[in-house]
Image (cartoon, grey):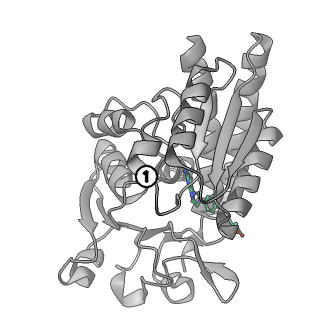
């Protein structure tokens, strides 16, 4: 039976560490500040954004949500970002994704100054990660690495298989695992005979966005299973892993909810503090 990794617990530990760093900054007269841009009225996005704001205040980070109607001109968003980039009281900027279809996602995301890019989506931060000079690292894969560290799982030499190749999770996840000396395989929608690959995984990261995609026959006995999926099925949230069939085969497994999700939020707060430190050179 796999031990369940308690992401909600570890996120609390991480938030406490962050809260102490916020205190230290405040003693120097610096109050970390995060601004979240929410464009359109995607209901899930609105709820995530409120969760982020609440978490920020809980560690002493000031947070503000700027809301824009879905039909807003992209130029209005770019101008807003230029202003926020200039504002010395703003340390972190996050543009909630997905954006309305008429906007160019990479253009908008890369308009955030790379020093305030707490999502780590700016081209410059992406490039830094790929050459190992990490600056801002995307929150979800960073949260996975923190979970592995907290759980004392040494991935050196492990065969890590990542399912999914998105810019937000799959690619940065593969880069971080590689930096930690895992042997990394990335699977995706065009991969042939995926099961043969996933069955070789000592560490399997599921980031496909398909509910219960990974089932017991995809998994090697004793593997560590990290479920990054957040899917809504019949009003309930479930992961990319079929938890009930996979859990008995795994050595450790993250649940959904209360697995990687809370760590993502905790890493957003940690990145905001890091951004404040970098901008004030402390
Ligand atoms: N620029 C940008 N950055 C993001 O980081 C980003 C984004 N856009 N767009 C949407 C996705 C989604 N995302 C989640 C983070 C935490 C939970 C989370 O903590 N979920 C709880 C459950 C919450 C619930 O019950 O609804 C859990 O897994 O336990 C979920 C989803 C961040 N995203």
Picture coordinates of residue 23, whole percent (x, y): 78, 23
| Quadrant of the image where one finds ligand 1 | bottom right
Numbered label tally = 1
Work out whether residue 121 can be spotted: no
279 lies above or below 75: above
Picture coordinates of residue 243, whole percent (x, y): 55, 82
- Horizontal side of 224 relative to 175 (left or right) equals right
82 vs 36, nearest the viewer: 82
160 vs 278, nearest the viewer: 278
226 lies above or below 53: below
Picture coordinates of residue 9, whole percent (x, y): 71, 55
Q: Which residue is rendered at x = 71% and y = 41% of the image?
A: 15
Q: Quadrant of residue 282?
A: top right
- Horizontal side of 132 relative to 95 (left or right) equals left
Mark 1 Cα shell of 10 Å, populated few (<14), some (14-19), many (≥20): some
Work out whether residue 275 can be spotted: yes
Q: Quadrant of residue 94?
A: top right
Q: Which residue is rendered at x = 60% and y = 35% of the image?
A: 80
Picture coordinates of residue 216, whole percent (x, y): 42, 88
Q: Which residue is mark 1?
A: 105
- Horizontal side of 90 relative to 107 (left or right) equals right
């Amino acid at each position: 039976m796999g031990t369940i990794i308690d992401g909600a617990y570890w996120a609390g530990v991480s938030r406490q560490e962050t809260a102490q760093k916020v205190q230290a900054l405040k003693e120097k007269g610096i109050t970390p500040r995060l601004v979240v841009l929410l464009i359109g009225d995607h209901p899930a996005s609105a709820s995530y954004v409120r969760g982020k704001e609440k978490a920020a205040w809980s560690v002493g980070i000031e947070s503000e949500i700027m809301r824009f109607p879905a039909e807003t001109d992209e130029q209005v968003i770019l101008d807003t970002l230029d202003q926020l980039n200039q504002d010395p009281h703003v340390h972190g900027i996050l543009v909630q994704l997905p954006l309305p279809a008429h906007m160019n996602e990479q253009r908008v995301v890369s308009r955030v100054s790379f020093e305030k890019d707490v999502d780590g989506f700016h081209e410059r931060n992406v490039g830094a990660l790929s050459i190992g000079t990490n600056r801002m690292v995307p929150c979800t894969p960073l949260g996975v690495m923190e979970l592995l560290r907290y759980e004392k799982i040494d991935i050196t030499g492990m065969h890590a298989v990542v399912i999914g190749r998105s810019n937000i999770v799959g690619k940065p996840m593969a880069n971080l695992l590689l930096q930690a000396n895992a042997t990394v395989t990335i699977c995706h929608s065009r991969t042939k005979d995926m099961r043969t690959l996933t069955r070789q995984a000592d560490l399997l990261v599921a980031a496909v966005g398909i509910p219960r995609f990974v089932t017991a026959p995809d998994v090697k006995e004793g593997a560590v299973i990290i479920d990054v999926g957040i899917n809504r099925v019949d009003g309930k949230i479930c992961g990319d892993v079929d938890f009930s069939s996979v859990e008995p085969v795994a050595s450790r497994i993250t649940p959904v909810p209360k697995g990687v999700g809370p760590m993502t939020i905790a890493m957003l707060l940690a990145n905001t503090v890091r951004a404040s430190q970098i901008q004030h050179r402390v």
